[in-house]
Image (tube, coloured by chain):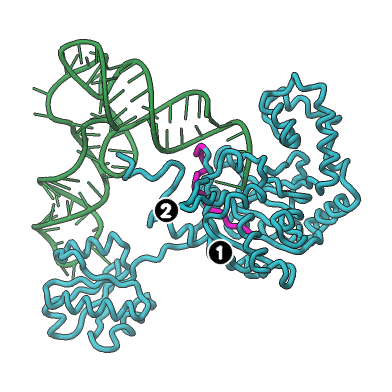
Chain colours: A cyan, B green
Amino acid sequence: MGLITNAPRGTNDVLPADVYKWHYIEQIMKEIVQCYGFKEIRTPTFEHTCLFQRGVGDDTDIVQKEMYTFEDKSNRSITLRPEGTAGVIRAAIEHGLVNAALPQKLYYFTNCFRYEKPQSGRLREFHQFGVELLGAMSPASDAEIILLCKCLITKLGIKAELQLNSIGCPTCRAEYLNALREYYADKKESLCPMCLTRLERNPMRLLDCKNSNCKSLLVDKTPKIISYFCGECHEGFEKTKAFLDTAKVEYTLNPRLVRGLDYYTNTVFEFIVHDIGAQGTICAGGRYNGLVAALGGPKTCGIGFAMGLERIILTMTARNCSFGECKPCEVYIASMDEKSHEKAFELTKSLRDGGMWAECDLAGRALNAQLKYADKIGARFSIILGTNELETNTAFIKNKQGAKTQITLNESFLQQVQTAVSSS
RNA sequence: GUGGGUAUAGCGUAGUUGGUUAACGCGUCAGGUUGUGGCUCUGAAGAUCGUGGGUUCGAGUCCCAUUACCCACCCCA
């Protein structure tokens, strides 16, 4: 197999046999999110590279080594979106949504691109469902977003662990980072090489290193962000937890939960499953109070989350969750000769005009082969037309078990078929 | 970017210590039987064994390289 017949690495085809799964989860999500007042927004697949450098953060792995960046024919640096939030915020600023009635509630389905090595639950082109709530600062908004997220996955039949943390505002986080650097200052020789660079770039990353030496340095004395919260951050986090408690949302506090995108502040959370491989975060999000301003908009707070749709499907498949039903073909009209074939063609159209999925022969096959095909596509009913049927202007509609009903080939054909179909 | 595993028709597999025209099931297509769908029978198409080198009289089988897929690290949804 050459390049032509191989999809690029890390991309996936969704075949006809599987699309209904996507339709199902998209449908469920739209229904629920509408009850929460969110409106869909669609933004471009590519943006100016600087949007992500500024929005996601120049220091992040995503920007440093995972973006699909190229120059267009006018030498503009363009990047395929590696995530959904930056583009949505850019659009919200550009079109003044952040100056309209606040809070703004936005949702999106989007494909994202990251140059990573593919593995279970990780692709180079993957799909996210995301939600952004702009201009609401109260802890109730944090709780609402988390609640919405939980509601969505629950509706899909997924039980997942919710991990919760707050990483503070830039002010208290700066203090905390200093404390971390100080704590590790005399322990550098015990750190893995990876953590040494983390210590420089993003000390909070040290907290979730899997290296056993690095882990052993995490003890009671290791500074915790909670102890560095300013009054506002402390109170906000407490109230958020209280709202979650009243909504009966269960969560695990994970002081080591850190997010990889620079824009997060305060509340961060993840929904995690353990049965789809190493990449078990099916949904993650948090607050980003500085992002809108950082991108040149008015000072506006925000909070949101994104779900990995491939991971959602992996989880649902692993757990045998329902994806709804795939509707089969309703009626197949078979024909025995040229004349009846013409009639079949005409009648098929009339059924389709009435909103039914109907089929007739398109391959020029013998009657037997037509019926075998009808069976393969799951046709619930068949009608066979031959010289007899055309002469008498009547035919039988038959279900899979062989039960027959006589119908007349007149202007009430559609009605008769509908009656036969619905009464069985 | 770093590691481990895998690679034979559309799919799933067999292929014995290297030995003639690479086998089987499912699927596809054509046809037969049957009362007009399941069932059943017959036949056909479809693989230069991922690709490129090497060893050998001879390679699907052994060696090297390369690519892709799977899994994990890193990181993330």
Which of discs 1 and 2 lies nearer the camera? The answer is 1
Q: Would you place residue B61 above or below residue A22 in this image?
A: above
Going by the picture, which residue comes out furthest to the bottom? A411
Q: Amino acid at mark 2?
A: Val
The answer, for residue A104, to whether it is visible in the render is yes
Q: Would you place residue A197 above or below residue A371 in this image?
A: above
Horizontal and vertical percent position of residue A201? 72, 35
Magenta span covers which residues?
A117-131
Q: Which mark is residue A42?
A: 1
Query: Does the stretch in magenta take in A121?
Result: yes
Name the residue at 63% across, 57% down: A154
Q: Amino acid at mark 1?
A: Arg
- Between residues A372 and A249, which one lies in front from this camera angle? A249
Mark 2 surroundings: few (<14), some (14-19) or many (≥20) residues within 10 A: few
Q: Would you place residue A368 above or below residue B16 in this image?
A: below
Q: Are marks 1 and 2 on the same chain?
A: yes
Horizontal and vertical percent position of residue A293? 74, 57
Q: Which mark is residue A14?
A: 2
Q: Secondary structure at mark 2?
A: loop
